[in-house]
Image (cartoon, helix red, strand yellow):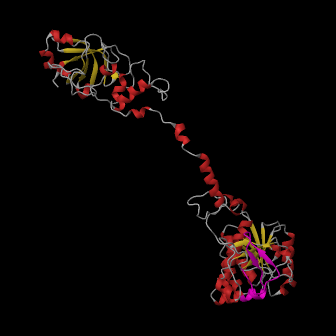
Amino acid sequence: MCSCSPCLDSSPDSMAADWLGSLVSINCGETLGVYQGEVSSVDQSSQTISLKQPFHNGVKCPVPEVTFSAVDIKELKVLDIVSGRGGVVPKSSDPVSVPHRGHHKTQDRLASPQQQCSKSYGDKHLEVPGQSKGFRRRHNSWSSSSRGANQVTPKKNAVKNGGGGQRQHRDDECFGDNMDDGLDTDFDFEGNLALFDKAAVFSQIAGSDRRGNGARSRGTPQEQQPSQYRHDKNILETKPVVYRQIVVPQPGAKEYCTDSGLVVPSISYELHKRLLSVAERYGLSLERRLEMTGVCASQMALTLLGGPNRLTPKNVHQRPTVALLCGPHVQGAQGISCARHLANHEVEVIIFLPNFVKVLDAVSSEITLYTKTEGKQVSSVEELPDSPVDLIINCLDCHENTFLMAQPWYQTAVDWANQNRAPVLSLDPPVSGQGHAVEAKWTLSLGLPLPLSEGVGRVYLCDIGVPRQVFQEVGIKYHSPFGCKFVVPLHSA
């Protein structure tokens, strides 16, 4: 390609006049861009060329005419040679109708520099489209811009409505002249659907359902199909649940069951003592049992007091009050251990423990630990609160020493508990037949329940950490009924 300046110098006036109305593309470099339009004038003296109805970088200019100087023109290409009024290269996305001369087709005249062969402005042998035998017009998306303003895109059903010519023309522009004519036909949905034998397929599905006992077949019909499951069911195959997993050598008078239906039989007090003796021989000492019982009892008490709904840092003005009635025995030591844990959880705790002449060493040790907390200890019933407390934990009764029930301090404590309108939690009470002076709403048993009477309220079971082999050694077939908890409720079977 030659530059514009020598071409304008070498062209005579008559030749310059011949190019009026021709479509040209002028490249003015990266700064000014590319302009396309119809030549309106060529001035030899000032070395300028003017284009009317110009397009700048494919966008129509807002001015009707633009004049270029030869020094600004980097390259000039002739898109179409005409004599008279011509059209302007339209934007591909905005087709416009332009006038044209003779029998030239609009799509042949209105083309971009990428569609036509470039022609030098000053060349003597200018080639126009159609004159070269080896010339073949290229097709791309720019050719779609050659449609006029009155040409609309044909619809999908253009073949049925007689618009096949426009569709063929569009396909030729996009894919070339040698495209397969078979692509012009619409896809025959009805004919393709007729190939699908719906009745046969549904008959096969129904047969698979019958073979699989109602389950949808997924695989060969001979395969055994699993049962259908709901979205909230476990699809893993599990063994049937054995609800009697604890078997004792001598069944007690009562049986209980957990919320999941596991049967928990009661044991006699003699078997209970032998179980604790074997556990202590293997290392589960009394101190360990007291600590475990105190933790579980305090956890149950905290739940009964309201749990997180009441025991929060923001509720310091309504701290619950718990009174524990303790005796000089193991049950009393268990109550003191529970009181220590409650005091550590910001509960107002009051222990009633008379000044006995002789108490167990375990009781003395628990009292020593309890005094390090902010809990209170009283030895007289008169020092107990007159107003109802939130919870009373009864640890007065003993499994073996029933003579304590006849002493004055015991009777006074029982009267205070029964007159106070607070609910009572009984901790490890004795078996039935020995009497329960304090009416309890809840009862906490340890390890395995004893055959308690109906007056003990609702029974709960506490895990004190006895290993399974210890149960087996005393003749108890044992499987833990606690699951993820340390305290579980029991129901009368």
- Decide which of 424, 445 is in the foreground and name it: 445
Q: Is residue 181 left or right of residue 447?
A: left
Q: Is residue 155 above or below residue 462?
A: above
Which quarter of the image is occupied by the N terminus? top left
Q: Quadrant of residue 248?
A: bottom right
Residue 85 shown left or right of residue 205 in the figure: left
Relative horizontal placement of residue 416, taking residue 90 as reference (left or right): right
> Image check: 188 left or right of 348?
left
Q: Is residue 247 magenta?
A: yes
471 or 176, which is in the foreground?
A: 176
Q: Could you tell me residue 393's position as x and y percent? A: 77, 73
Q: Residue at x 71, y 83 (%)?
A: 363
**Residue 273 in view (yes/no):** yes
Q: x, y percentage for residue 93?
A: 39, 26
x and y, in percent, of residue 185 in the image: 45, 32
Report which quarter residue 335 is drawn in. Answer: bottom right
- Is residue 265 part of the magenta span, yes or no? yes
Residues drawn in magenta: 246-274
Q: Quadrant of residue 290?
A: bottom right
Image location (x, y in percent) of residue 169: 38, 26
Tell me if residue 230 comes above or below residue 349 in the rendering: above
Foreground residue among 287 and 56:
56
